[in-house]
Amino acid sequence: MAASLISLAALVGPQDLKPAAHALRNIKATDLPPLAELYVHSYGDGTSPRDREKAAHRISAVLKGSHGTLIPQASLLTADAEGRIIAAILTTARDFGTAGPGTAFIAELFTDPDHRRQGLAEELLNHALQALHDTGHRTVAVTVDSTNAAAVALYLSRDFRRPTQPAENN
């Protein structure tokens, strides 16, 4: 069964940040192996690569610019008390020739299944949105599988909406 992807977008504004429940930090290149492991584990339902090598290639490609220029301030991870990465967000930007920062894109947001429903994705998203605001981005977009109810609900709760097409003049 093919995934039904939907695109959502939101305006970026200042966030009402609460103290982080877990340690948050920017993603580094050396995080690739544990990020790939988490990616495979997070999408064990078959919606993403099932082996670590393919997952590492996907994450590496995002880090190297396959989805636009990585925005380090808005590409974050959170770790548990033992330092294991349990959730991550990768955010990129594409410049469409506009003055100032282009549209930001959430390339990936994933959480360890054993740590879901703890607000980690929302916490990462809020901090990434604040970082986007701080760096002058005005809009952010994401493409999500419409069957991923938790992800869709998260984005809708943060005022993401389907972009509308302008009416055509006849």
Image (tube, rainbow, N blue to C red):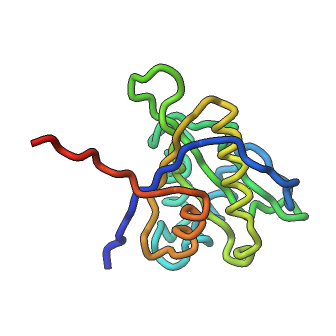
Q: Quadrant of the N terminus?
A: bottom left
Please say whether residue 30 is visible from this viewpoint.
Answer: no
What residue is shown at x 31% (from left), y 74% (from top)?
Answer: 2
Q: Position of residue 69 (x, y in %)?
A: 52, 34
Residue that protrudes farthest toward the left in the picture: 170
Taking depth in this image into account, of 56 and 156 the one nearest to the observer is 156
| Left or right of 111, for residue 44 | left
Taking depth in this image into account, of 141 and 10 the one nearest to the observer is 10
Q: Quadrant of the C terminus?
A: top left
Q: Position of residue 161 (x, y in %)?
A: 46, 57
In the displayed structure, would residue 55 be above or below residue 12? below
Quadrant housing residue 133:
top right
| Left or right of 83, for residue 48 | left
Residue that protrudes farthest toward the right in the picture: 81
| Left or right of 65, for residue 1 | left
Residue that protrudes farthest toward the front in the picture: 170
Q: How many marks?
A: 0
Taking depth in this image into account, of 83 and 4 the one nearest to the observer is 4
In the displayed structure, would residue 121 be above or below residue 102? below
Q: Position of residue 115 (x, y in %)?
A: 74, 74
Q: Position of residue 143 (x, y in %)?
A: 44, 57
Please say whether residue 49 is visible from this viewpoint.
Answer: yes
What residue is shown at x 35% (from left), y 70% (from top)?
Answer: 4
What residue is shown at x 73% (from left), y 53% (from top)?
Answer: 77
What residue is shown at x 45% (from left), y 41% (from top)?
Answer: 66
